[in-house]
Image: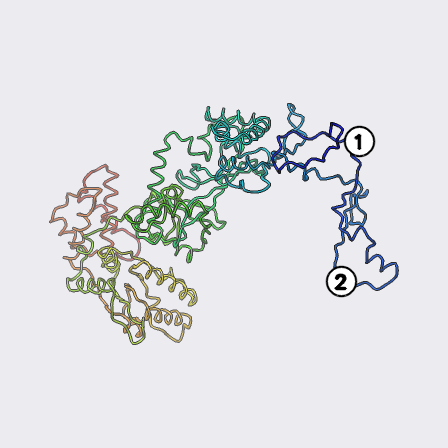
Amino acid sequence: MGNGGLRGTSPAPPLGSGDGVLPPIATDAEAEVKAPVESQPAVDMEVDAVTEEKKTKKPLPPVGSVSSIKNIYRSPKDDDGEWTWVDKYPEDVEEAAENAETETYAVLVRNIKSNDSRKKLEADSIVIQSPWLKTALSEILNEYPGVACELERLEFSAPFAPFVHRWTEFVAYTKRPGLDAKTKEHLKLLDDILRYEIGDSIKAFEDYVRNGVVTFKHLWMIYQPGTIILSAYKGPLSAFELQETEYIQNNCGKFLQLSCDCVDSNGKSFGRFGETILISEFIGTKKITGLRAYPWSFHEEKEAVVAALTKRGELFEKLAGHSFKSYLGTAVTWDREGNEVPIQVEGRIIVDIDSFNRFSRYGERSLSEWNAKDYERLAQFRHKYSNDQGELRLTPYHHVLARSRTRGYSLKLKKWLDFFIEQVSEITWNTTAFDKLVLPDDQKELILAFSESQLEGSNFDDVISGKGKGIICLLSGPPGVGKTLTAEAVAENLRVPLHTLSSGDLGSGSWEVENNLSEILELVSRWNAILLLDECDVFLEARSSADLERNKVVSIFLRTLEYYEGIMFMTTNRVDNIDAAFQSRIHVSLEYPDLTAESRRQIWANFLGSSKSIRSDLTMKDIEELAELKLNGRQIKNILKTAQLLASRKRSRVLKKSFIDTILSIEKRRPGPPQ
């Protein structure tokens, strides 16, 4: 048939196979407006059953019993801006632009009026329908978050961020040798569209990368989802995996919001934890590495940064359980509103994320599961190295993403805190602490015997399992004779934590004491620590009928001791007033008499010999004279400490006897009862 044949009689081409040229537009005569029959169910083409019943005044069927569909339509707004639902089909409804015919084109471009003075129209979105393009894009946009090229309708919205971020890969693919003709043809169509729509953005992006600067308007361009960014967010420089970006505005101004992940632990397992980093609006251009967060590809010493982050991540992994460590530096606590507050910490700490989550009042960080790529990395890494190194939990990639902080407890401050990984160090033990303890040899031997045996695991048990398995030692005597120092020396000798508490730490009410004590004993048991209850007279004092609340406290304390399985030291100055029920629960009771001249001489010598900050010129005769003064160990320590401060004030490198005499003279004039 010649050119006079009817249009549309030939079969439609396959879906998405078109060359991008639209068919001729129909004439006015051919474009007669018709209501879309397919959009009206059969029930609206006939007399409505319910309406007919109304006309004949028949009773209506039960609610929801008619086996059909009823369509109603929204009416135009009236003068008051109100609308309602009506039965009448709208006459101004136009045919849908996307139909079986448009599905045959390789790419569908949805255009809107452009705000750019250089363009009449611009693309609101594009729909990729070509199977050849989908195959190519599945490689070009591989692992790009939020893009699934296997979908039947692969849609991208302006400003077409995936193509901006992967433009280099897109161009390289179009130049790849061996592409079939159809793929080349469709790639050329897409290339023409993208160059028209985002050509200026690509040029701007390449210019920013070349000069290392960026504007706030185009800030999103440098952040490709799925890549690693560096930021000193909530600590030292750390790495995060970027998930998505979004421009937001609040009362504080405009921001680019970066949603990203790091690797964290809940004390039992590892996972991802989401963080949100905001970059505030700025005028003009700004250096990329000067931003609050920037892609690590822009760092001048990327390899060195990766090595440092990997090393820190390995330490983070080792600290995931519970560890007894030393700490010096700034840690993080929180105020009543939950805002972070820096705090200076020096001393022994317990790194224990699981116990932090259970016992602190600050709550836990909820982790997200690993994603599919994480599981793939972990499986490959374990398969490669498991034979040589045993079970591995984190890959080098996850070490880089590990959080810069961990959580635990400061034994000195008695606070749950966030600790910076790089400030955590191994403990330097005092190996001579127990030897310098001024005690009779038989008492020292006894204390060491039951302490060591308890830590190794005692097999002795009560008739009732778990009852009476602990070791409780009561140390009594006047202040400053070495009661507290004994517990400290034992813990140092055994290289275990010492958790020191006073009656004030446990509270005053019976309910408060019971809860706090049970929590502390559980922690001490978990940490394999020694518990020291210092000046615990309020718990040991004999019960009386005059104070029922205190009687409850004593009873709770007695019951708790019965089932305690660790080592506990208790110190008191009033051993004569102990409740009789405590006597049978105390395994070892040691009384510390007032210090003798020989004991004081040894204490003076110990403190003078252990000082590292200043050298002493005191002779043995000077020490003998000082030992005759009736001072306790705590007073001797305080006098020497003050004398060293005086020597420092005098800019003397030597601690002279005259400095000590000055402090002693001042002590004699101290107000209050005689010392």
Instruction: Give the image quarter of residue 12.
Output: top right
Foreground residue among 624 and 102: 102
Crowding around mark 1 (Cα neighbors within 10 Å: few <14, some 14 to 19, many 20+) is: few
Foreground residue among 357 and 268: 268
Residue furthest to the front: 1
Q: In the figure, 252 relative to 521: above or below? A: above
Crowding around mark 2 (Cα neighbors within 10 Å: few <14, some 14 to 19, many 20+) is: few
Instruction: Give the image quarter of residue 495.
Output: bottom left
Say how many tags the image has.
2
C-alpha separation, residue under disc 2 versus residue under disc 1: 47 Å
**What residue would you read off at disc 1?**
28
Q: Secondary structure at mark 2?
A: loop
Residue furthest to the right: 56
State the residue at coordinates (75%, 57%): 68
The quarter of the image holding the N terminus is: top right
Q: Position of residue 473 (x, y in %)?
A: 26, 66
Could you tell me if the residues under marks 2 and 1 are in contact, i.e. CB atoms within 8 Å? no
Instruction: Return the mark for residue 63.
Output: 2
**Coloring basis for residues:** rainbow
Instruction: Name which residue type carries label 1.
Output: Asp
Query: Upstream in the sequence, badge 2 or badge 1?
Result: 1
Q: Secondary structure at mark 1?
A: loop
The quarter of the image holding the C terminus is: bottom left
Instruction: Name which residue type carries label 2.
Output: Val
Q: Position of residue 417 (x, y in %)?
A: 39, 50
Relative side of 140 to 316, left or right: right
Between tags 2 and 1, which lies in front? 1
Q: In the figure, 74 relative to 169: above or below? A: below
Foreground residue among 459 and 635: 459
Q: Position of residue 635 (x, y in %)?
A: 24, 53
Q: Position of residue 610 (x, y in %)?
A: 19, 48
Relative side of 138 to 432, left or right: right
